[in-house]
Amino acid sequence: MASTSDIKNGLCIKHNHDIYKIIEFLHVKPGKGPAFVRTKLKSVTNGKVLDNTFSAGHKIDVVRVETHTFQFLYPEGNEFHFMNAESFEQITLNRNVLDAPDLLKEGENVMIQINTETDLPLSVDMAPSVVLEVTYTEPGVKGNTATNATKPATVETGATINVPLFINEGDKIKIDTATSSYMERVKE
């Protein structure tokens, strides 16, 4: 058993008869009253996110996990197929386990956390950013750049991202996988 002082991002815990991954946390010590930890938890079974507050010193049940590198092979409906980079064993995960499935490109490496007790995959961690090519976007209107105007652009994986007006088809852009938002244009 661990306590709230051991909480960190990415930690998997058992809570309310389910396994949750901690997405965000904040230790709060108000001027009056006891300290507490405010957390945002994501269920690894159904993908639902909930806010929870633990009082300081509260005991939490940590799930032991191992992290392995897997290569994304291909999507098939709501199923995503991955291959272990070391053992070449293949696994299939449901779409709702992934944080940003629309940004996953074939051949991309991801880190998958596996529960050591049951050998079941818990979560998939992508790189902080990905570089994808814009396959379709409307041309930008000249003179409309005084404000931070954006337009929708479709990238090679099929995801739609809001980009600045100067981005054109064929440009490669860097996308933040946590927020699915445009970061910068990539020069080749």
Image (cartoon, rainbow, N blue to C red):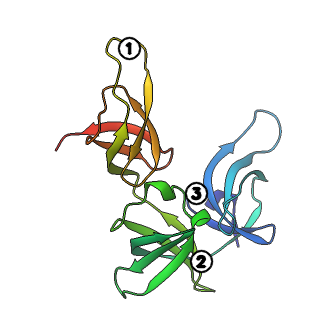
Q: CA distance from mark 2 to mark 3?
A: 14 Å
Which label number is shown at residue 8? 3
Residue found 29% across the figure and 34% down from its top: 168
Indicate which disc residue 64 carries. Answer: 2
| x 36%, y 25%: residue | 165
Give the image location of residue 74, x and y in percent: 42, 71
Q: How many numbered marks appear?
A: 3
Q: Residue furthest left?
A: 188
Q: Amino acid at mark 3?
A: Lys
Residue at label 1? 144
- Image location of residue 171, percent across then percent down: 26, 40
Q: Residue at x 71, y 40 (%)?
A: 29
**Could you say which quadrant of the image residue 48 lies in?**
bottom right
Q: Earlier in the sequence, mark 1 or mark 3?
A: 3
Query: In the rendered view of the protein, which quadrant contains the N terminus?
Result: bottom right
Instruction: Assess disc 2: are there few (<14), some (14-19) or many (≥20) residues with their C-alpha within 10 Å of its C-alpha.
Output: few
Residue 44 at x, y percent in the picture:
65, 67
Seen from the viewer's position, the closer of residues 142 and 94 is 142
Q: Is residue 153 above or below residue 100?
A: above
Separation (CA) of disc 1 from disc 3 = 44 Å
* Residue depth check, mark 1 versus mark 2: number of the one nearer the observer: 1
Q: Nearer the viewer, residue 64 or 133?
A: 133
Mark 1 or 2, nearer chain start: 2
Name the disc covering residue 7, or none. none
